[in-house]
Image (cartoon, grey):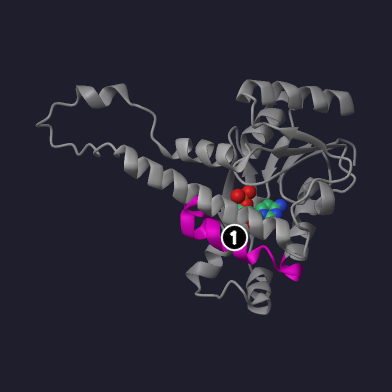
Amino acid sequence: RQRPVIAIDGPAGAGKSTLAAHLARRFGFLNLETGAMYRALALKAIENDFAFDEEAPLLELASHTRIALEPQMEGNRVLLDGMDVSRRIREQDVTSAASQISIHHNLRAWMVLQQRALGQQGGVVMEGRDIGTAVFPDAEVKIFLDAAPEVRGNRRYRQTIPAPSPELSEIPADSGRQVPPPQSAEEQRAAEEAILRDLKERDYRDRHRAESPLQPAADAVILDSTAMTLEEVLARAEEIVRAHL
Ligand code: C5P
């Protein structure tokens, strides 16, 4: 290939997507989110009532499935058999199903082949769990982005809270518009704990599966963002990329 591959791996909620989108913009590369491919197939499995723990039917399903990733400024538009599923695949049921179907050996091999085809020209930032270890073991740059589980859970939780909207307070009380009641502190704590539980469960499955378990490639630069701001992470990653290109 003529241009480099930048591989970004790490556990859920470490900030891989944000980092990948930033690096892609900065260096003029395409940003490809491989997790979205597992999510898209998981969605098709849900819609067709497939069990997540039986590989053969899932593989058969995959063999007549088309998944396309269209890089955008922020993240990817994801097409499943031509249908835009970009939003749907972020929901909780798909998230959990993607984590469960991703343990299967041949299914991963099918994904890896497609991901290699997508990135073979280079000039891509590819993000996932096994990019530096399995998809592109020869990637020019490998970053393993990590953070303590509690920090990742808290960041994910804060993404779920809508940003305070100044217009809301300006809506007259009798306008008929429904304003959702604010969550109590207890509800907030419960919601954050549920997110953390789910994240730990997915991590556990990713790290302990037999097939391409989540682990840093021997030659990856490990970036632990636990005590870093977003700006610091982006700046450090840019340095790493520049040093390797
Ligand atoms: O990154 P994202 O959360 O969208 O990935 C969804 C799921 O797909 C993950 O929980 C992981 O189990 C699986 N995955 C994977 N290998 C990748 C990308 C994602 O196993 N390269």
Does mark 1 have its CB less than 8 Å from ligand 1? yes
Secondary element at image label 1 = helix
Question: Residue 87 magenta-drawn?
Answer: yes
Q: Is residue 175 above or below residue 94?
A: above
Q: Residue furthest left?
A: 174
Residue at 33% of width from left, 42% of height from top? Answer: 186
Image quarter of residue 235:
top right
| Residue drawn at x 69%, y 71% as measured from the top left | 63
Q: Which of 94 and 25 is in front in this view?
A: 94
Residue 182 percent across, percent down from the top left: 27, 36
Image position, residue 102 (x, y; %) = 67, 62
Q: Is residue 160 above or below residue 63?
A: above
Q: In which quarter of the image is residue 108?
A: bottom right
Helix, strand or loop for the magenta stretch, by majority:
helix
Q: Using the rendered image of the protein, determine whether residue 86 is visible from the camera's viewpoint.
A: no
Q: Mark 1 points at which residue?
A: 98
Quarter of the image with the C terminus is top right
- Asked if residue 130 lies left or right of residue 14, the reply is right
Name the kind of residue labelled 1 in the image.
Ala
> Left of 230 or right of it: where is 207?
right
From this view, report whether residue 19 is shown above or below residue 48: above
Query: What is the span of residues highlighted in magenta in the rendered image?
Result: 83-107
Residue at the image point whose x is 47% and y is 40% from the top = 157
Is residue 59 found left or right of 76 in the rendered image? Answer: right
